[in-house]
Amino acid sequence: MKITHDFHIHTSLSYCANETATVDNYIEHAKRLGLKKLGFANHFWDENIAIPENNETGYEITGYKYYPQSHLAKLKPELQKVKDAGIQVFYGCEVEYDLPHRGVSITEAVAETFDFILMPNSHTHMTMPTELYHPYEKHVDFMFQAYEDTLKSPVSRYITAMAHPFMAVCAPYDRDLLYGLIPDDRFRRLFDATAKKGIAFEINTADMEGKTPEEIEDGPSFRMFRLAKECGCQFLFGSDAHSNLSHNFYENASIVANLLGLTEKDILEIAR
């Protein structure tokens, strides 16, 4: 099937996106790629939740103090200007794992103001103490903890999808090593719970640049995709775009959908 949505797009309002990451540019990408729905999800930490003061990751998570809800809301007028009837746009955010509170970096009241919310368990470069990088099993356990705490959180009912699950962002080693440490039955228990919660599993194409269909299917993350499908998870696709170049390989979304044998019912309703 052809994937006609992208629900993981950052604009220049995100600290890590560049000046080419604009709504206008992304609309042009959507027209070129035949996309019908775009979900904008800039990084967000709710100002009503204390940011960890003693961050040990080496990443300046405190930068979120400068991105309150009013900052993200600057995007709304731009989205309202989108007149192309063939493309729907959605106002969302990408939140974080709140380690001190074993929760999610957004309150229920604020969560209600977004069309959709992405939650990564794999931003370990931002939220995980550096001593957990070794041995690798500790890194894996931290991601499971973040994922499980999200499912148990009171705001879990507002979480639309788990963003790039277990794709350990900016790991100081080959993150593909981590997938092999996770047995099928451990994944299945987690994905069964995800399906019951009605939270989608995001397939993120940021890790697929330059790969052939055979390389994608033989890659270590593809086993995880298959297991999520077997467990009844629905899917949401995203490019994780941070610049004007990020959609150059988004055709891989449709390739993955076909390799998995996905049909419309396997796609989360908001993206159909």
Image (cartoon, rainbow, N blue to C red):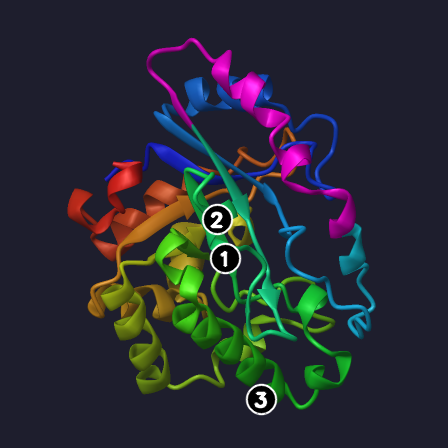
Tell me which numbered mark, 2 or 3, is placed earlier along the sequence: 2
- Name the residue tied to disc 2: 109
In contact (CB < 8 Å): disc 2 and disc 3? no
In the image, is residue 67 part of the stretch drawn in magenta?
yes
Residue 256, visible in the rendered structure: no
Q: Earlier in the sequence, mark 2 or mark 1?
A: 2
**Residue type at tag 2:** Ala
The relative height of residue 176 versus residue 82 in the rendered view (above or below) is below
- How crowded pointer 3 is (Cα within 10 Å; few <14, some 14-19, many 20+) is rated as few
Q: Give the foreground label among 2 and 3.
A: 2
Report the span colored magenta. 64-89
Q: CA distance from mark 2 to mark 3?
A: 36 Å
Residue contact at pointers 1 and 3, CB within 8 angstroms? no
Mark 1 to mark 3 CA distance (whole Å)? 22 Å
Q: Say which of marks 1 and 3 sits in front.
A: 1
* Sooner in the amino-acid sequence: mark 1 or mark 3: 1
Residue 37 seen in the current view: yes
The residue nearer to you, when weighing 13 against 125, is: 13
CA distance separating discs 2 and 1: 17 Å
Label drawn at residue 119 = 1
Q: Position of residue 6 (x, y in %)?
A: 43, 37
Q: Position of residue 147 (x, y in %)?
A: 47, 72
